[in-house]
Amino acid sequence: MIFGKLQLESTIQENDKTRLNGLDSFITVDEAAITLMRIKPSATDSFIDVTSNKYLDWSYSSEATETVELEITTDGAPSVFTKTISVISSATDRLFSNDSDLVEIEDDILNYIRKGRNSFLDKHRQSQKRIMDSLDRRRLFKTDGTKLPKEEILGLEEIKQWSTYLTLQIIFESLRIEPNDVFTSKANHYAGLAGQTETSVVIRLDENADSEQDSVNINLQTGRLLRR
């Protein structure tokens, strides 16, 4: 039997490099050897031969939900395995920090971008999720009791530093090899800075989605929602 294992990111920003990976695909011992492996990055693209390295580095140019196909051939008809990837614009992504913010603090941080990528946008996205989860845990909701969406947070400069420190923490956590190595030390350092920054942040809201600040602020130090 043929077992296709297609690994890819669930969400990717337009024009950001990503890796469509079939490296962990395998066959049972009674199956003939793999003679051809191809990947089709979207319905409008053609299959590309990846037999030698079993992955394809790719970039999508516009927002869409793309279906990626992995085709594996042994001695018979090819087997095809599919997964979807969500491609979004930078405006939709609305990340709270970017790689330039990281470089201002850690000059050589871009040297640690993992293979198959050319940015840390995936890590910034993780930071954004942690920030939104933090607001949710504090039960800082909209006036109608629903969760705060990222689209209603204005003044991203207010939380950029928090997101930057969180992203650096996440990056160095992913790099550490031993409990007390330099990456662990850096991760702990930025975790502390992220915690300090979190408690001093005041978040400004746009509750009626008109892209203008409403008279609503959230003070994370006191946990109070302030109206003027």
Image (tube, rainbow, N blue to C red):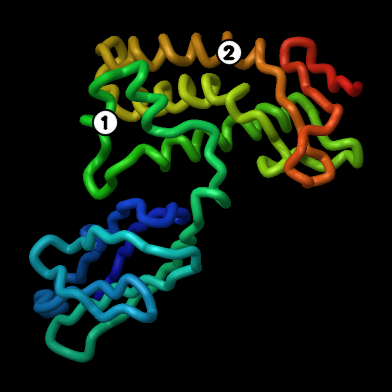
Q: Which residue position holds label 2?
A: 197
Q: Is residue 87 left or right of residue 105?
A: right
User: Which residue occupies 49% across, 61% down?
Assistant: 86
Q: Which residue position holds label 1?
A: 110
Residue 181 x %, y % = 25, 12
Q: In the rendered image, is residue 1 in sight?
A: no
Residue type at mark 1 is Leu
User: Which residue occupies 73% across, 32% down?
Assistant: 136
Tag 2–tag 1 contact (CB < 8 Å)? no
Q: Earlier in the sequence, mark 2 or mark 1?
A: 1
Alpha carbon separation for disc pair 2 and 1: 23 Å
Relative to 23, residue 147 above or below: above
Residue 92 x %, y % = 57, 51
User: Which residue occupies 23% across, 85% down?
Assistant: 78
In the rendered image, the quadrant that contains the N terminus is bottom left
Q: How many marks?
A: 2
Q: Is residue 141 left or right of residue 1?
A: right
Relative to 184, residue 111 above or below: below
User: Which residue occupies 29% across, 17% down?
Assistant: 183
In which quadrant of the rendered view does residue 130 lie? top right
In depth, the one of 99 and 197 nearer the eye is 99
Residue type at mark 2 is Thr
Residue 175 x %, y % = 28, 27
**Category of crowding for the residue at label 2, using alpha-carbon neighbours closer than 10 angstroms: few (below 14), some (14–19), many (at least 20):** many
Question: Please, what secondary structure does the residue beneath circle 1 have?
Answer: helix
In the orientation shown, which residue stands out farthest toward the bottom?
A: 77
Relative to 191, residue 87 above or below: below
Residue 89 x %, y % = 50, 55
In depth, the one of 147 and 155 nearer the eye is 155
